[in-house]
Amino acid sequence: MKYSALFVTSVLAVGSASAFVPAFRKGPTLLFAVKSKPDPSPSTSSRLKRTTPLADWAKDNDIKIGGVEIVASNNAGLGLYSTQNLSVNDIVIQVPTKLTLSVQSPTDYNTVMEKNLFSSDPKAYRNSPWWTALSIQLNYYDKVDSVNQLAGGVNMKPWIDSLPRAYDTPFHWSESSLDELQYRPMIEAVALQKRVLRKQYDDLVAASKEFSSRISYDDFVWGCESARSRAFSGAYSGSAFNPIPYATVTALVAVYIGLGIGTVEQAANGAALVVCGSILKDFVFPKLVKAQKYVICPLIDMANHVGVGSTGNVAFEYFSDGFSLSVLDPGVQQGKEMFISYGPRNNDQLLQYYGFVEQNNAHDVYILPPIREWNIEALEQACGRKVGSGRLEKLDRAGLLGFATNYLNTNTEAANSIGGVVLTRTTGIDPAVIQALRALMSSDDEWEDSGEAIGNFAAEVSPANERAARTAARRALEIELESKATTIEEDENLLKMYKESEGIDNEQVLAVLFRLEKKKLLKEAIRNIA
C-alpha cells in the first residue's frame, strides 16, 4: 500500500481545522474498544483477544486514537470501524515514527539487527529485499528481544502479539487446491515465491549463525507474509522536521548582526544556505537516488483494503514526525468500516500476498498464454484468413510471441514470467497484442504495403484487417474461457452451496471466488471487443 506525498499532506493534516476527530473534543473516551460482529471465525476471535493489551500499550506510547475501534467480523477478520460520524480530514490515528518498523530500499542500515543477528556479515541484512529485512525485524522483536532500543526501550510485544499468526495465502495451499484456481500464472507465481523465499532464508543462514539459531524457516515465512500484507510504501523523503538547525542559525544571525560582525545581507545569505541545505537533504537528494521506504505502522495496519472508494488515507507528518490515518471524502458514518487503498492491486496480488479476493475488482487483470501457444488454426477459421509466411518469424524477433520457456526469474512482483498476453478490466487487451494480430492476420497485399514491418501495424491499416485482428483476439479469449474445467454458472452455484455448508476450508472458497472473477473478466473482454 502507498502513503501520501509526504510534505504536502502533512502540512494539510497538521494545519486543518479538524486535526483530531471530534472524539478528542468531547471529553474522556475509551482509547479504542475491541469487539466482534456475529460469528467471527475461531482464528479471528483468538486474534481479537490478543489485541486487548494494545489499548494500554498505545496510551503509554503516545499513540492518539479516537473515533474508531477494532472489530472482528466473520468475512474480513479484524478491521477499523467508526464509533461516530467522521468528517473529511478528521484524523483518527496518529503514531510516532519511532514505533514503526521501516526499511529503506535499496540499502537499509539497522544497527540493532546488524549487531545482534548479523555481526559477522552486516551486508547480509543491508542488501536484503525490503520484505526480507522487515521479516528479520518482526522476528527479532517476536523471537529474540521484544524491546525496541531504537524507540527508546519500548516493548513491542503487545503489538507483535496482535498480528496474525497464520495467513490464508496460496503459499500454504496443497497442489490440488492450487489446481482449483484454474489459472496457470498464479500457480507459477506461487512456485516462484517458494523458491525465492527458500533461497533468501538459506543465504541468511549461511551468513549468520545468530540468525539460523533463533529464526526458523517457518518464522521467516511468517515475517515475510506479515511484511507483504501490512507494509505501506512511498518515496523516501529524508528525516522528519528538525528545529535545531533553524534555531541555531537564528541565534547566530542575531549575534552576527548584534555584534556588528557583518551586514544584514550577509547574515541572510548564511541563513538561506542552511534552509536550502535542509530542503536538499530532506526532499531533493532522496528523490535523486530514488530511495523507497517501506513502513509497518502499528494500529494503522488494522485498516483493510478497498480498490475503489477508500475512506481513509495514510500520510507521513513531516512536522510532527509521525504517521496518521485521516478521513477522506465523503466521510464515514457511525458503525461503518473505514477502508484504505493498498494501491491498484489486482486479484493475483491480493490473493497471493494478502489472502483475499476483491469482487468486481476494477484493477483486475488476466494473463493469457503467450501468442506462440495460441491455436493458430482456430484463429484462421474464425477470421477466414490464413497466416502468411514470415509473419510468425517477424513477431518472434519483435518479442511479441512471448517466451518459449519460463526463463529464470527471481522477481516475485512479476507473475507474467512467460510473456503472456495481458488483459485488464480498465483497458481491455494489450494494444501491442492487437498490433501483433493485425500483422499476423494480414493479407499478402497488406503485408507487402507495410514493408513487412511490424511497426507499421501499430494503427489500423484497413477495416478488413482490423476486423480480422479483433475476431482473432475474441476467438482466443473464447478458447481460453472454454478451456476451464467449470463454467461461470457452475462456480456461482458452488459458492452458494459453500455459504450454506459448514466445515468448508477457506482456501476452497477463495479458489472458486478467484477463478470466477477471472472468468467474468474474460467474458467482459469478449463482449467489449468490437
Image (cartoon, grey):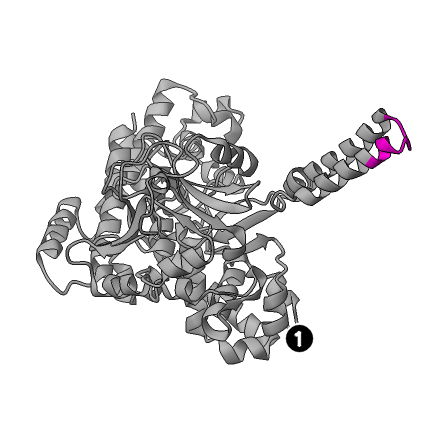
Q: Is residue 164 above or below residue 403?
A: below
The residue drawn where x is 58% and y is 62% is: 150
Q: Is residue 453 visible?
A: no
The local crowd at label 1, few if under 14, some if 14 to 19, many if 20 or more residues have their Cα within 10 Å, is some
Q: Is residue 24 left or right of residue 458?
A: left
Q: Who is closer to the viewer here, 27 or 412?
A: 27
Q: Nearer the viewer, residue 310 or 206?
A: 310
Residue receiving disc 1: 120
Query: Residue 516's spot in the image, x, y percent?
Result: 22, 47
Residue 215 falls inside the magenta stretch: no
The residue drawn where x is 23% and y is 37% is: 523
Is 363 drawn above or below residue 170 in the view shown?
Answer: above
Residue 492 is situated, as x and y percent measured from the top left of the image, at 14, 47
Tell me if residue 185 can be seen: yes
The residue sitting at 29% across, 25% down in the picture is 530
**SS label for mark 1:** loop
Magenta highlight range: 255-263
Question: Whole-percent x and y of residue 506?
Answer: 22, 60
* Most foreground residue, 242 or 208: 242
Query: In the rendered structure, which amino acid carries the disc numbered 1?
Result: Ser
Image side of residue 140 versus residue 254, left or right: left
520 on left or right of 11: left
